[in-house]
């Protein structure tokens, strides 16, 4: 969980830096002033019309995305910050929700060998020394009386359901992020329409293009931002859900293989 919080803070900070662009602007302004003061004004004066035109076009291209993002206002900024936070959680989940961490084959082999040899104490100690999804499922089963398979089986099933539920609740953040992005986009659309109609009402229906462009741009930009953020994260939620279902099935099969010797030797319930 510490890694998740740190990753969110870092990615959000980077996102704020990219959005503001103050460092890039200050650096470019400083370099331009340095060039002017360094004695290169004579050479630049001969080609000033061409270079200034190119610089203007380049500045427009660089500033177009930034101006579009700023047109979204506070609501657009909230959507973008939500996107950066969700991306941080995606990175954290991709690093933690993997087959090698959920169902490590080395641990499964060692547990299977210990259970088959009947060494209960070492099997329990091994699970306690290697906390994880698989060990948290196997450990409650190993704590039960090995001569009662019904107790062992129920403990394993309950632990598997608990651990899987934790992971499913964890990835629900992506569904929440997608739905929040849609709602924020709708909120920005409504606010933009309010701003537009307010300008019309104040001007008595004679508002010019400059009076209407702010509200319309706010409505369109926030709607687009909400959709752009929501669609990928809803898709990621669906993909991770299917991935977790497959991983949980693999863990269930592995646990069945590990506890198989107990089932063969345990007494049947009366």
Image (cartoon, rainbow, N blue to C red):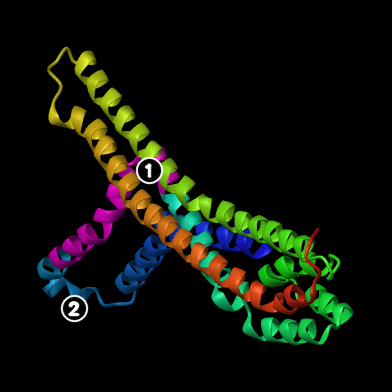
Q: Circle 1 sits on which residue?
A: 76
Q: Considering depth in this image, is 119 or 135 the residue closer to the camera?
A: 119
Q: Residue at x 44, y 41 (%)?
A: 180
Please tell me whether the stretch drawn in magenta is mainly helix, strand or loop: helix
Question: Left or right: 157 with respect to 224?
Answer: right
Earlier residue among tags 2 and 1: 2
Asked if one can make out residue 21 in the rendered structure from this viewpoint, the answer is no
Asked if one can make out residue 9 in the rendered structure from this viewpoint, the answer is yes
User: Is 125 within the magenta?
Assistant: no
Which element carries disc 2, helix, strand or loop? helix
Question: How far across and down, in percent of the image, does residue 116 sit?
Answer: 77, 85
User: Is 61 within the magenta?
Assistant: yes
Which numbered dot is residue 43? 2
Which residue appears farthest toward the front when viewing the image?
A: 270
Question: How far across and down, in percent of the image, does residue 22 sit?
Answer: 42, 57
* The residue stretch that appears in magenta: 53-79
């Amino acid at each position: 969980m510490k890694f998740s919080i740190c990753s969110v803070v870092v990615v959000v900070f980077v996102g704020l830096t990219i959005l503001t662009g103050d460092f890039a602007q200050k650096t470019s302004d400083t370099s331009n002033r340095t060039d002017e003061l360094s004695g290169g004004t004579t050479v630049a004066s001969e080609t000033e019309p061409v270079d200034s035109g190119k610089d203007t076009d380049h500045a427009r291209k660089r500033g177009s995305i930034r101006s579009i993002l700023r047109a979204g206002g506070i609501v657009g900024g909230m959507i973008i910050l939500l996107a950066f936070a969700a991306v941080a959680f995606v990175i954290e989940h991709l690093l933690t929700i993997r087959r090698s961490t959920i169902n490590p084959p080395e641990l499964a082999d060692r547990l299977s060998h210990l259970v088959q040899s009947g060494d209960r104490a070492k099997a329990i100690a091994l699970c306690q020394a290697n906390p994880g999804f698989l060990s948290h499922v196997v450990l409650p089963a190993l704590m039960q009386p090995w001569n009662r398979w019904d107790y062992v089986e129920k403990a394993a099933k309950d632990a598997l359901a608990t651990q899987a539920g934790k992971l499913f609740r964890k990835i629900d953040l992506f569904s929440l992020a997608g739905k929040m992005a849609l709602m924020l986009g709708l909120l920005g659309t409504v606010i933009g329409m309010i701003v537009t109609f307010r300008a019309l009402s104040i001007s008595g229906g004679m508002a010019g293009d400059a009076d209407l462009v702010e509200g319309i741009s706010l409505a369109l930009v926030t709607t687009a931002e909400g959709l752009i953020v929501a669609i990928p994260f809803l898709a990621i939620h669906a993909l991770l859900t299917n991935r977790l279902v497959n991983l949980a099935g693999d863990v269930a099969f592995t646990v069945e293989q590990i506890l198989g010797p107990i089932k063969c030797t345990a007494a049947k319930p009366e």
